[in-house]
Every structure is written in structure tokens, then in C-alpha cells.
Amino acid sequence: MKAYLKELMYYILAGLIVWYCIILITDGVHIKQGIIDSIEACMNIIIPSLFAFMAASGIIVSSGLYSFISKPFSLFSRFIIGMPSSLFSIFLISNIAGYPVGAKLICDMYDNNNINKKTAQVMQCFCFGAGPAFVGSAVGLELFGSVKIGMIVFLSCVISNLALAAVMCRLFKLKVIQNNTNLHFDSAILTDSVLSAGKSLVSVCTLIVFFSTLITTLEHYGIIGSICRRVGLNGSEGLLRSVLDITNLARMHSAAYSLIPVIAGICSLGGICVIIQIKALTASRYSLKLFVLTRPIVCALSVVNSFWLLKIMLPDSLETAACKSGIFVKVNNFVPSVCLILMIFLLKIKKRVAFSKRV
């Protein structure tokens, strides 16, 4: 029976792909605009904000710097969270730098034989966050015109990850196989980290472009609007788009204050696109089943945390009407991003030439 169901799912998937290809051909005008918007988002937002963190994450792991960053938090890490002290810097950076950076750090730790597969699977569950830069600008300023609200959403997600870490680190004992206590750094570490970051960003950006075409298609045929009306979220199509791809939060430009807890939950989820990005980055190194199972729990915790944080940080009664906010700054990082891509390409060629000369 399972074999027949699996075969049926393959036929359904094949049919959907064929249907999607037909749409791409017949309604190319609508898809084209979605692709243009997503490429602009990648060049202006994703690449400038994530590349430095991804490159730095490789340097931090390969050089052994993560052990030194963790030392000031050793007591908190061991006795409150129950996590090996040398791993707390991975948790800290993951929740500050952005969604894919956590997976990149864990993969680097696993590839360098610093942690085993089980530890990587557990750490992935709570080393996952949007970061204050994205939440403060996309949620705080763009949606509500208040950085404080963005920080409330950010803290809701971080506290939820901390709570999950405190439970999971006691259920699953995390192990550090090889702890780099000697700091070392050379040009090879820098080059490898930069190239690895570039390769990771290619996966991230291509998935964002693909999901943009998918969302554009669903909007064009009224599927997103229909789903929102059925679940009682009429007029909140932006929230559903954000569940598919979290970058759509920045395109809403306004939201009701009553939706802050919902947005906190969506930020903890990260969106389907981000989850697939994590899968692409981790490849076959370790399973993401535990990560997928625990995400709904973290989302629920973030919703609850946002309520009491709102009462503490914004004690006045909140309006239920939508808060309108304009775009404060129109960022254009297209040319610097192109230069960055060319630099990575040249580094790759130089590394191959150097390898050929040695051989």
C-alpha cells in the first residue's frame, strides 16, 4: 500500500511540475516581474547582509575562535542551558546573524570533526534565527514604524530558542569531539571561508528566486487570496506569503498591532523557503527531522513570549488598526554585490590555478 501511495505522490508531483512549466510559458509576464523583484532583493538585501556573516562563520570555526568567544558565557551555558561551553558561541551567532548562518556554522563544525551527527541534529533545532538586523528593519520599521516592536519580536524568538535549548541539551547530551583550544589563522582559512560562503549564498539566492516565481503564480491565480479567506485572514495575504518566504514581510509595509504575536511565530518558523535553504546547505550531513518537529513548538513559544514582552516593553494599550509606515531608506547595493560575486569568482579561479601548479 505504501509503495502505491508513494508512486501516486510521484505522479501528482510530476503533474504539478508540468502544470507549473505550462504556466511559466503562457504567463511569463507575471513571472518575469517576480523574478526581477527577487533578484533585486538578493542583490540589495540577502547578499550584503549574509555574506560577511557566512564568511566569518567559516573563519570562526576553522581558526578555533569559537572556543574563545564562548568563554565569557561558560557558567551560563553549562549550568543554565546545559550546553558544552565551547558551543554557546555557535548558538549566539546563529540567533544574531540570520537563518542560514546557523546551519553554515553547524556544518563547518561537523566537517571539521568538532561535533558528531547527533549533536549537529540537536543544535540545528535552536541555532536558527532571523537576527536583529532583519527583524528590526523588516518588522519594526517597515511594518510598525518602531524598532522597539522589532526587538520585541526578536527577543520572543531568542527566548524561545533558549527555552528549547535548555530542554534539549538535557534530553540529548551534546558532545564536543575535538575542541580547538589553540587559535590559528592563515590565508587558506580566509580563502576557503570566502569561497564556501559564496557557494552557500548561491543555494540561498536561487531558492529565493524560485519561491518568488511560485508565489507570483499563486497570487496571479488568486490561490493565496482564497486560502486567506477560508482561514479567516482576509486582507492578510502578506502573512501567507511570508510563511512561504520570510522576505515577504518586508514587502507588507503595514500591519495591525494585533498581528505582532502572529508575526513573531512566523519569524520563528522562518518560512518554507528558509527551511529548504537549510536542507540545501546541510545536504546529506545530518537529518532535519528533529528540526522540523520542534519548529512548531518554538513558534508557539514565540507567540506566547511576544504577549508578555509587549506588556513589559509597551505597557500602553495597543491600537488594533493597521499602522502605516513609509519606506525609510531605499537601499541599492546592486553594484557592490556584483563586485562581490566577481571577487568570489576570481578567488575560485586563483585557487584552481594554484592547485594545478602544485600538481
Image (spheres, grey):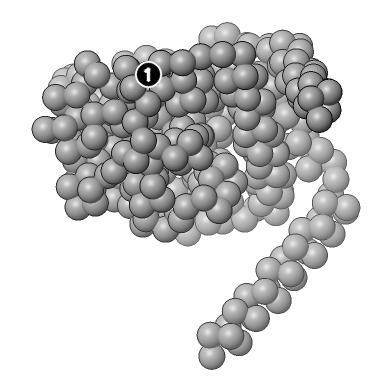
Q: Is residue 136 above or below residue 101?
A: above
Q: x and y percent of residue 342 in the render?
A: 79, 18
Which picture quadrant has residue 248? top right
Q: Residue at x 65, y 81 (%)?
A: 7
**Observer-nearest of 123 and 129:** 123
Residue sitting farthest toward the bottom:
1
**In-image side of 278 versus 64 (left or right):** right
Q: Residue at x 51, y 20 (%)?
A: 59
Q: x and y percent of residue 36 in the render?
A: 77, 30
CA neighbours of label 1 inside 10 A, class few (<14), some (14 to 19), many (20+):
few
Q: If the image is split into quadrants, where does the C terminus sit?
A: top right
Q: x and y percent of residue 257 in the render?
A: 34, 29
Q: Is residue 114 above or below residue 219?
A: above
Q: Residue at x 17, y 38 (%)?
A: 82
Which picture quadrant has residue 315? top left
The disc labelled 1 sits on which kind of residue?
Answer: Asn
Residue sitting farthest toward the right:
25
Q: Is residue 240 visible?
A: no
**Observer-nearest of 257 and 336:** 336
Q: Is residue 276 above or below residue 47?
A: below
